[in-house]
Image (cartoon, helix red, strand yellow):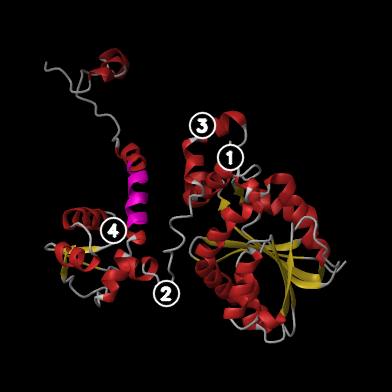
Amino acid sequence: MAESPYPELKKSHVPERVGRPWTDHKPPPSAPVWAVIGGLGSFYVLVAALEMEVFDALANRGAIPGIPPDVTAPELAKEMGVSAPHLEALLDSLAVLGLLERVGGRYGLNDTAARYLTSDGAASMASLVPVAPGPLENWSHLAETIRAGRPADPIDDDPAGFYRPLVEGTFTTMLRAATRADLQVRYSAMTAPRVLDLGAGGAPWAIAVLKACPNATAVINDIGGVIEVAQRHTAEHGVADRCEFRPGDFHTIDIEPESYDIAVLGHVCRTEGTEGAQRIIIRTHEALRPEGRLLLADYFVAPEPQWSPHSALMGMTMMASTTNGFPITAAQTADWLQEAGFEHLRLIEPIGHQFAYVATKPRS
């Protein structure tokens, strides 16, 4: 009998164990391992393309999804002033990743690139991609972080330097989620709600409520170096005159008790650890009027993490770079809300993969 191509499996698949002669049992595919190995290179391929404004260059040539690609790598390289062979390798890699269209050696935008990767795309992520993983050096020390129980270089030492580019990059997506949430939360039906937005980042949730309710007002909080992003975005959306900005740590700033109709915790709880998240949820409960509602948005891990891979990996990003950050589950978040005194919990998904709990403070 010919030798098996997988001789190591003879130890576990001999007739004494499987009850039949050797029949060339095949091992599982290595594709999942190679996918992870290729992930680093794929990330840098996309970062390089964004840094070189490849997608914008194609858009400026009139490339439209659905229209046959019409530019070659040498033509585009000449316009961009770069090496044609090197650009072609980059374009081919983008096509392999599903981020460009390639037909017969000509390139163009596909729907994904036009929507998410051009600088003026409808849901542009161009500024988010480079900063989404957090400080890259922290990933190279992840094993040390896990052994020690904390990152060697946590972003807590310079939180504004970490969070400012992150909130800039996520603003477009979060504003879409906050705006669409009105279909399920119906804050537009409120007369003149007062909003408390803690750790607001660019303040997408406050902006969505203020635009839906002409008589609404908001208190917007974040740390110095980040709250300026909220000030700029509220001005751009024409609602800054109805906002009060309170810089500082949301655990310690002054907050009036029972004074708000809506409180927002947008993607802050997973940065706080269990104790910190519970404290800030309690603060929002105290700040809300009876029947006021808390909107708590985050990436919640499902009971089986493989059901929510994005959430699990976003939690790992926090763990890699912050002292207290961890993945948080939907179940533990619901427990925190109920322990703080909230009721009528609902988990909504305004847009794909963007979830938020809506919880109500009871009358008494």
Q: Residue at x 43, y 57 (%)?
A: 129
Q: Amino acid at mark 1?
A: Asp
Labels 3, 4: front one:
3
User: Which stretch is magenta?
Assistant: 38-48
| First-in-chain label (2 vs 3) | 2
| First-in-chain label (3 vs 4) | 4
**Mark carried by residue 297:** none
Q: 243 left or right of 320? A: right
Residue furthest right in the image: 364
Q: Secondary structure at mark 4?
A: loop
Q: Residue at x 16, y 54 (%)?
A: 85
Q: Give how far across and how far down residue 221 sits, in percent.
A: 71, 65
Q: Which residue is mark 3?
A: 143
Q: Secondary structure at mark 1?
A: loop
Q: Which residue is mark 4?
A: 98
Alpha carbon distance from label 3 to label 4: 31 Å
Q: Which residue is mark 2?
A: 122
Q: Is residue 341 magenta?
A: no
**Mark carried by residue 153:** 1
Q: Is residue 40 magenta?
A: yes
